[in-house]
Image (spheres, rainbow, N blue to C red):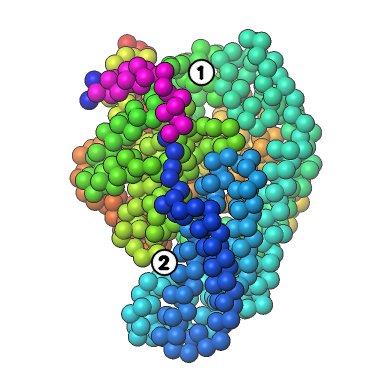
Amino acid sequence: MRTVLLSVLLLVVAVSATAETERQTVTWDLTDLYASDQEWDKAFESIHDRIYRLAERNKGFGKSAAALADFLIEQSAVTRDYYRLSAYARLQNDEDQRDATTQQRRAKVRALATRFSEVVSWVDPGLLLLGEKKLKRFLKQEPRLAAFDFYILDLIREAPHKLDNKGEAMMASASAMTSSPNQIYSMIANADIPWGEIELSDGSKVRLDQAGYSGARGAAHREDRKKVFDQFWATWKEYEDSMGATLNSEVQANMFQAKSRNYDSVLQWQLAQENLPEGVYRTLVAQVNENLPTLHRYFKLRARLLGVDQMRYYDIYPPLVEMETDFGIEASKQITLDVLKPLGEEYNKHLVTALNSNWAHAYPRPGKRSGAYMNGSAYDVHPYVLLNHNDDYNSLSTYAHEWGHAVHSMLAKREQPFEKAFYSTFTAEIASTINEILLEEHLIAAAKTKQEKLFYLGQALESIRGTFFRQTMFAEFELAIHEAAERGEPLTGAVFTQMYADLLKKYHGHDQGVVLIDEPYTMEWAYIPHFYYDFYVFQYATSISGAAWFADKFLSGDESARAALVNVLKAGGSDYAYQILKRAGLDMASPEPYQALVRRMEDVMDRIEALLDQ
């Protein structure tokens, strides 16, 4: 197998003269969504009219089970077509965000979304007025309501937190206000702060904005890293008060929404949307705190590999082992196919179809959106994947990750009706992260040199540190600031800095001398955009833990784990994510998945130390 992979890599090198031409051809085909912009325009007008007609359906829609089915099927059809409309606008604009025409098309879709939300804001209150007994009777009487049973039963569960028509319309209108802190953060971070340049020891200059910091913080020379950290966080410090006010506004907006919907806390409100028990969140935080010695062991190992006597916060980001990697798009495709064979015939049938189709926009271009994502929102059409492939290891890992999302969507759509096909983030990231773990183990096993093996082991360690420990630190901070506000404590920039400093020092073993945290760096809270996503980041940590649990079973030869995982993917959104995983044998409110990930981290460190001691 390794010979095949090396041959693929050599082939990529051999055709380097035409590489740029090939890069331009590795792109998606949006005509599967709409044959032309003119067809999209016609669809927009049709969907616009159908949305407005829904506003007229609030009389008599619940007079019988048949009438209710008629309305819900109509609303679902409009939603289905709107998702397709939206997918085209987003994907086309993300090809080149400078394009004024696609900007306008995307803006039209956003405005339509707001109007759509307002138009159907009466539906949930109207259903609840019918009463639980009547709704359940309708479900038994009308077979066409089967696609909506989970939606209706979930609505009944949430009944104590739903408002009347006027209240729901008000909350829909208030969305512009409650989303403002995120917009303000983005404007300050990306437009208002006058980012300066920094000159590194090799004479190169870097504009130390968000992107510049992300690249320069891993500089090979330690004095460069310190210089980057000192300047970047000193700049943020100047905005401590304004960023404090912005984040406090986010917290207050969340409290307003939680109280308006009769929840006891913001955490309860956020988790209730997925019907997740608080035990998931609190067990995660407790398990991470209990296993901080494992993280501290990692930092000591990092110090050994970097050759530093005393780790400091600016030593977190340089790679443990330097190695040039070359994974072009064809190599990434072949390796991903090889890596995921253990997931079984059904999974791989979908994967082969996806990787052999024009469903991805692979390489960077001027104006293209940064990062990577999978868009599977067009139910009647295959998923699309946006990449910014740089032919390196991170690109290969991202490739395997995003196609994991795509196959998840393909399996869910095949198994579930539109109304139950769209899954929770809680299961989505398990489907993609397990691919990363299987890739890591594949490359570690195939490595021919000590250097290569250390490189991939180091990548596995960094993935756990960044996804499990760091994201949980963010989650603990997010919980702490909301609970402080709920106790009536004032939140300012200085308060946020102190709270974050306490967590940063605890996680990094500052008081034990493991990693020393310089005070200016405790401004990091102001830089993190995830604090405006509202109790979202913890799911990265739960997902890598769930993926490690499944991977541990795969790698130990447990054949039942394959069927269990595929069934999770097929389930889509037909039930609560927590319950879907429990049926697969995985309880995310128990310590077990988090302990599985810690065991993996300890094992990886054991393997590294064994290599170093050879």
Q: Compute the Cα span from label 1 to label 2.
A: 51 Å
Lateral position of residue 303 relative to residue 343, left or right = right
Q: Is residue 305 magenta?
A: no
Judged left or right of residue 51, residue 337 is left
Which tag, 1 or 2, sits closer to the chain's start? Answer: 1
Left or right, residue 9 beside residue 156: left
Magenta portion: prevailing SS class: helix
Q: Name the residue tied to disc 2.
A: 419
Residue ID at (59%, 74%): 52
At 46% from the left and 16% from the top, the residue drawn is 322
Q: Horizontal and vertical percent for residue 457? A: 38, 24
The quarter of the rendered structure image containing the N terminus is top left
- Residue 320 in picture, x, y percent from top left: 47, 20
Residue 304 can be seen in this image:
yes
Quadrant location of the C terminus? top left
Secondary structure of the residue carrying tag 1 is: helix
> Which residue is rendered at x = 40% and y = 70% of the image?
150
The label number, if any, that marks residue 303 in the structure image: 1
What label sits on residue 406 in the rendered view? none
What's the residue type where badge 2 is placed? Answer: Glu
Magenta part of the protein: which range? Answer: 4-25
- Mark closer to the observer (1, 2): 2
Are there few (<14), some (14-19), or many (20+) residues within 10 Å of tag 1?
many
User: Residue 79 location, x and y as percent?
Assistant: 49, 66
